[in-house]
Image (cartoon, coloured by chain):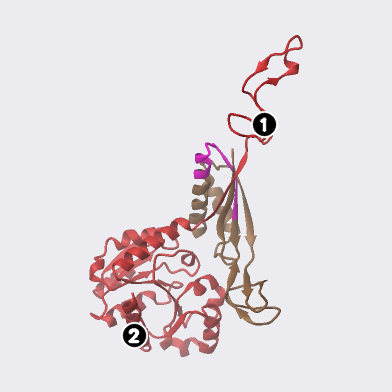
Chain colours: A red, B brown
């Protein structure tokens, strides 16, 4: 066995016959390695999750938020499902019983943050530029800009997108997916990873159900199929219909933190 | 869109592996992607060329092992292929929500030199 690197080749003296017919001479340490013919290529096993960095940061967030006694929600939906109105009404109706702060993610503009700020809610805006989702690192940086000791609930309004945010754990306690009655009952079937990953599914804009021809039974069947473990709420943030069960649920969840 | 972010992470792991082995080039990356991972293999291939440009992995090949989703049936004590997260066992028709494969988003190995 080779004494230099343990490669299994016979080392020591190598006689090179063709080199000099008159006499033999000895080469001490040269030896061929097995991988010489594939130009030194070698395969390194990694078997690692591509999400491990985010997963690690998300767990760090989770521990930090837990230490701060915060209930953290990650609110996801397609664009225009009513995330901002839902969050604003949730914060306003909770009033002083539970103090809510918000982190808002959008590709551009701080319109959503401005709308929440006008309602007197502490807000930090993350403008992602071209990035289609929030990740745990962005949330950690944004959370540092809020006075968390003065909050009971931290709501993260994700970028409006039912695909990419599904893969990114932010360190939340509850992932809340919104399905508005104007979007079609088959949304859960079209975006199963997101709906499956949610702990809570909220049917929003219920005041428009009749006008939109919303088939409630079909939507619930689809939700139960994909989000089978999720708590389901049906409400209109605008009229306040159905908000009470949701707010009671939040108070209960916060008490359990 | 998030395929670019995920591919960048795969590249980072590959380049780190090459550097710690003293290699100067990454010639192949092998990924495992489940059908319910939320990531599209074609978009990953597109992102791959973009993110590898000018790195140790410039010109490397990308191999993607597609993993189909499978649920576990408690009654039959066996796996069956499925299309989403909640499915009926083709043998006993009981429903199962216990996904055994399909969410993979992993780097299997890299070829370096």
In the image, A165: left or right of A72? right
* Label 1 environment density (alpha carbons within 10 Å; few <14, some 14–19, many ≥20): some
What x and y, as percent, mark residue A137? Answer: 38, 58
Q: Nearer the viewer, mark 1 or mark 2?
A: 1
Specify the label residue A43 is tagged with.
none
Callout 2 secondary element: helix
Q: Which residue is mark 2?
A: A248
Q: Nearer the viewer, residue A211 or A28?
A: A28
Residue at 54% x, 73% y is A192
Q: Is residue A130 something one can see in this rendering? A: no
Measured in 3D between alpha carbons, the distance from the residue under mark 1 to the one under mark 2, in whole angstroms, is 72 Å
Hey, which quadrant is residue A238 in on the image? Answer: bottom left
Quarter of the image with the N terminus of chain A in it: top right
Residue A33 image offset from top left, x and y in percent: 65, 32
B20 part of magenta stretch: yes
Percent position (x, y) of residue A208? 43, 87
Chain letter of the residue beneath label 1 in the structure image:
A
Q: Which residues are magenta?
A: B16-31
Q: Nearer the viewer, residue A235 or B85?
A: B85
- Give the label on residue A9, or none: 1
Proximity of marks 1 and 2: CB atoms separated by less than 8 Å: no
Residue A235 higher or lower than A13, as above or below: below
Visible residue check, residue A243: yes
Residue B25 located within the stretch drawn in magenta = yes
The chain containing the residue under callout 2 comes to A
Q: Quadrant of the C terminus of chain A?
A: bottom left
């Amino acid at each position: 066995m080779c004494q230099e690197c343990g490669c299994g080749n016979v080392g020591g003296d190598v006689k090179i016959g063709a080199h000099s017919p008159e006499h033999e001479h000895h080469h001490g340490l040269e030896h061929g390695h097995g991988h010489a013919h594939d130009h030194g290529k070698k395969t390194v096993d990694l078997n690692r999750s591509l999400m491990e960095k985010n997963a690690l940061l998300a767990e760090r967030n989770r521990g930090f938020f837990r230490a701060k006694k915060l209930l953290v929600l990650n609110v996801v939906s397609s664009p225009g499902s009513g995330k901002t109105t839902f969050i604003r009404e949730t914060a306003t109706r909770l009033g002083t019983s539970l103090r809510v702060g918000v982190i808002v993610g959008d590709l551009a503009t701080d319109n959503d943050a401005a709308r929440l700020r006008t309602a007197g809610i502490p807000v930090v805006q993350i403008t992602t530029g071209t990035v289609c989702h929030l990740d745990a690192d962005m949330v950690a940086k944004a959370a540092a800009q809020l006075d968390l000791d003065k909050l009971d609930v931290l709501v993260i309004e994700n970028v409006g997108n039912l695909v990419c945010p599904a893969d990114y754990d932010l360190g939340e306690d509850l992932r809340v997916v919104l399905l508005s009655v104007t979007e079609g009952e088959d949304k859960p079937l079209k975006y199963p990873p997101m709906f499956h990953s949610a702990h809570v599914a909220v049917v929003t804009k219920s005041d428009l159900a009749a006008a939109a021809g919303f088939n409630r039974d079909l939507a619930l069947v689809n939700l139960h199929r994909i989000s089978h473990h999720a708590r389901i709420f049906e409400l209109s943030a605008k009229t306040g219909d159905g908000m009470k069960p949701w707010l009671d649920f939040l108070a209960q969840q916060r008490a359990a933190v | 869109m998030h395929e670019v972010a995920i591919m960048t992470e795969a590249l980072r792991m590959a380049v780190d592996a090459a550097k710690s082995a003293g290699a100067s080039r990454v010639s192949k990356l092998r990924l495992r992607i489940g059908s319910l991972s939320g990531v599209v293999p074609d978009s990953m291939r597109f992102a791959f060329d973009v993110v590898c440009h000018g790195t140790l992995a410039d010109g490397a090949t990308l191999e993607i092992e597609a993993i189909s989703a499978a649920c576990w049936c408690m009654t039959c004590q066996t796996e069956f292929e499925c299309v989403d997260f909640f499915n009926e066992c083709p043998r006993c028709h009981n429903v199962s929500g216990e996904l055994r494969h399909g969410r993979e988003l992993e780097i299997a190995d890299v070829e370096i030199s």
